[in-house]
Image (spheres, rainbow, N blue to C red):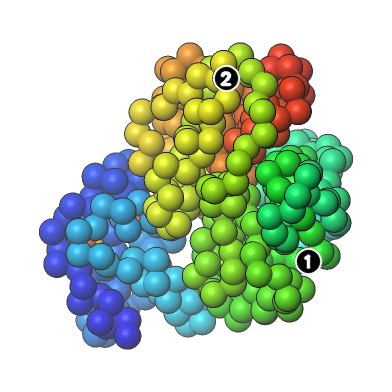
Amino acid sequence: MIRERLADCVHCGFCLPSCPTYVLWQEEMDSPRGRIQLMEKTLDGTVTLSPSVVTHFDRCLGCMACLSSCPSGVHYDELIEATRATIEESVARPRGERLQRGVIFATLPHPRRMAVALRLARIGRALPTPGWLRPLLEAAPPWRPREQAPAELPAVGTARGRVAMLTGCAQRVLFGDVNAATARVLAATGHDVVAPRQGCCGALSAHAGRAAEAHRFTERLRSALAGVDTIVVNAAGCGSHLKEHGLPAIDVTEALDDAPLPELHALELRVAYQDSCHLRHAQRLPAAWRPVLERIPGLEIVEPAEQDVCCGSAGIYNVTQPAAARALGDRKAAHVLATGADALVSANPGCLVQVAQALGRARHPLPTLHPVELLDAAIRGVDARALVADARR
Ligand code: SF4
Ligand code: SF4
């Protein structure tokens, strides 16, 4: 199967300009084509999984921009996930990397532990810490208690159907208010909403090659949400993982596709809309939130340059590859600032955290919002100034 998938690549190189790591370093082995050649050679046994070869695979963000730009339909997503699983099974990583990954996966997928870790991170940053722990402490966003989605919310007016919400792991801790806004928007558009008790969906583990752990998380979620016909997801990376694994998941934008919107109040704001890679490339929803946001009176949407290029967040990438993540984040922040927008809008929690930190480094912090928060505010008639004043930065 993997050999067949590898053979789909005709080595044309059309994917190179859209690959963020190739854009950064112009290095063939850090491009999709180069990585596919390395996969072929490791499978043939002509190249071993040496530290430098593993580094080329580790540097891949899994942003899937190469899926959109490949004319031959190469399934790079399946190839990199299988390669990462092989690396995790067969390569002994250096001690610092093992400890770092151990801490990441002992905290991030577990909301209670993550909330504690985020509070401790502030103290940790002021203390002398080992080099492997530093990127984790620096990537940790500020934490404050957030509103959470209710367990049930009935449709406003006549119900069109019943949907379950994925509340997520990191999403629930850092973006509980986005979940709450999503529930209100779904209810306002005629959905009976349920948000049953649930855990991590497994996306973070799967994208890091931890196949068995990812499988456990995904199957637990499948059981927790058994009996629902539709799972609405507001975090693009989680949505693509659930779709790939056969759960009945749809993005919020798909739930809104044929739903009549209630009257929308004006939001006088100029926002920079940054695509989420997993919505644009992995879920193949290139229009994403634009058609919905364009219906909000007073809202001006501007597009930063290099929409196709990942911001460098990419799951745990900003911790495991901090230099590359920082370079991509700073590049994205410069493009966002060049638009002159009042706020940054993106449909993935990781992207919001990553670009907010880069804007902070540029000494120009901007309010950052999930697009569902804009729609929720327009439905409820929240004043634009109040919305941005309360937004995370
Ligand atoms: S992955 Fe696709 S675009 Fe890239 S070299 Fe192979 S065939 Fe060409
Ligand atoms: S997933 Fe992104 S970083 Fe990885 S090879 Fe494809 S375009 Fe490059």
Answer with left or right where residue 314 lies relative to residue 378: left
Please determine whether, in this image, residue 142 is positioned above or below residue 17.
above
Please determine whether, in this image, residue 332 is positioned above or below residue 311.
above
Q: Secondary structure at mark 2?
A: loop
Within 8 Å: ligand 2 and the Cβ of disc 2?
A: no
At a point 51% along the width and 61% down the height, the residue shown is 240
Residue type beneath disc 2: Pro
For the N terminus, the image quarter is bottom left
Within 8 Å: ligand 2 and the Cβ of disc 1?
A: no
Q: Residue 29, position in %: x, y?
A: 26, 59
Residue 102: quadrant of the picture: bottom right
Answer with left or right where residue 49 lies relative to residue 312: left
At a point 51% along the width and 82% down the height, the residue shown is 89
- Residue for badge 1: 198
Q: Is residue 316 visible?
A: no
At a point 68% along the width and 75% down the height, the residue shown is 222
Q: Report the label total.
A: 2
Answer with left or right where residue 240 lies relative to residue 201: left
Q: Earlier in the sequence, mark 1 or mark 2?
A: 1
Disc on res. 90? none
Q: Residue 393, position in %: x, y?
A: 67, 27
Q: Residue 285, position in %: x, y?
A: 43, 50
- Residue for badge 2: 297
Q: Residue 276, position in %: x, y?
A: 49, 44
At a point 78% along the width and 44% down the height, the residue shown is 156
